[in-house]
Amino acid sequence: MNRRRQKRPNWFLISLLVLLIAGFTYMDRFIIPTYQSPFVATPTNTPPPEQYITQAQEFFNQGKLSQAIEAYQQALALKPSDPSIYVALAQVQVFAGDYKDAQTNAEDALLLNANLSEANAVRAWALDWQGDYLNAEAAVKRALELDPNNADAHAYYAEILADDYITGGGTTTDGINTAIDESKTALALAPNSLVAHRARGYILEVTGNYEEAIREYQAADAINDNIEDLHLSLGRNYRALGSYDQAVEEFTKANALNPSDPTADELISRTYATVGEYAKAVQYAESAVKAGPSDANLIGNLGVMYYHNVDWPDAVKELSLVVNGGTTDAGQKITPIQLTPDTHITEYYFTYALVLARLNRCGEALQIAQLIQSRVPSDDTAMTNAAAAIQICQKNLASPPAPTATISVTETSTPAPATSTAFPAVPTSTP
């Protein structure tokens, strides 16, 4: 039998194939993964949420509240399951005046952890600023049930009770006495807390202890001097003490920190009116209305300042919007403010009655004066000026009205709880 002849292997070809395989393997594992295609965008490193939280805290310390809010929102986008970020965001939003958004974020934190004391506390604070005292008190009590040593919760509770006392007319001292105790507790638990000093200052202010209130607000300001609310508070108390230059200085600082907020301009206007500088009062009242053109209270304040400055046609125009409603020259629709015992509201009404009388529009003036007499008979200032309007109209029957701007007005301290601007009588207990 013939044996089949065997072929010898081609070692050169085999070696070449092995080298090619090894080369492709190397390319696949080490070269291709590091190759950047010119058609694919270069990836960027995303900062961790902690970095945004740090930025937010820095912005807050600088008084840049809108930037702080944005930074917390960026942190939440990266870590939406962390309830503490929602709480921190909500607290800054309260300082910024975004009360509804603050409430929403506090409630989002509670969806993640219903037993988080801090979330219940900040929700209570946001509700307080919206005038919902009943739910605010329930929320803050829940916060204290979960953590009796939550200093912020004690501070918020003090404010809630004080605001409820103010808007309720101070018919009972039980609430304000508890508020005093709560403010002291907050400060004892957290002696270096801005929130605790602020709450303690507010309670002292409500009870008419303005010098002590200033010291507490200054202590809070020493912790962070870039918070608009603290400078507004200091200004109110300086004004209550008759230190008008210092009051205007603090209001001006507040205005610099948040120029879009009309509060400081309004308070400056009323401070200048108190010392008889009505031209300046008008200037700042006009600035306030520019910042808040749909706010009937700001329009009312402007009308009062026009009246003091003997600009009666403009005064009656502005005050008519407050009392009767209407549309401004800029197209803003104004809902009338109903007459209540609130000090500033009664001022709008009796000033309107007076300016109508001085313009010899006595049919309208008498209607407003009689409304005041029937609605707020316990307000001595309002009753005095309503009677003055009636007397002017009686004189108008015999002779034209005299161009004088002298009226009886009692300026009051104007702290800013959620819905009231005047404080009732100071309770007998020592704060």
Image (cartoon, rainbow, N blue to C red):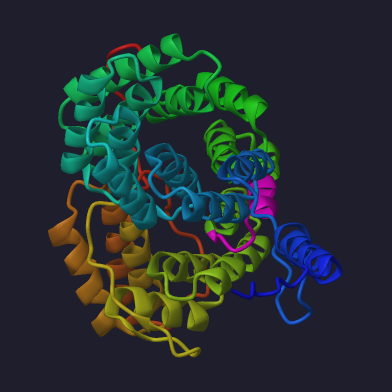
Percent position of residue 124, x then y? 28, 39
**Where is 357 relative to 181, above or below?**
below
Is 358 displayed left or right of 261 in the figure?
left
Percent position of residue 53, x then y? 58, 42
* Residue drawn at point x = 37 percent, y = 47 percent: 421
**Where is 314 relative to 298, above or below?**
below
Is residue 422 in view?
Answer: yes
Range of the magenta residues?
A: 251-262
Is residue 411 in view?
Answer: no
The residue closer to the viewer here, 188 or 37, is: 37
* Residue drawn at point x = 36 percent, y = 79 percent: 321
Counting labels gives 0
The residue closer to the viewer here, 181 or 314, is: 181
The residue closer to the viewer here, 279 or 17, is: 17
- The reply to whether the magenta stretch includes residue 389 is no
- The reply to whether the magenta stretch includes residue 258 is yes
The residue closer to the viewer here, 127 or 119, is: 119
Q: Quarter holding the N terminus?
A: bottom right
Percent position of residue 104, x then y? 32, 53
In the picture as drawn, the residue positioned furthest to the left comes out as 374
Is 74 displayed left or right of 251 in the figure?
left
> Residue 167 occupies which quadrant of the picture?
top left
* Residue drawn at point x = 30 percent, y = 51 percent: 130
In the picture as drawn, the residue positioned furthest to the front comes out as 1
Q: Quarter holding the C terminus?
A: top left
> Residue 70 occupies which quadrant of the picture?
bottom right
Is 295 displayed left or right of 134 in the figure?
right
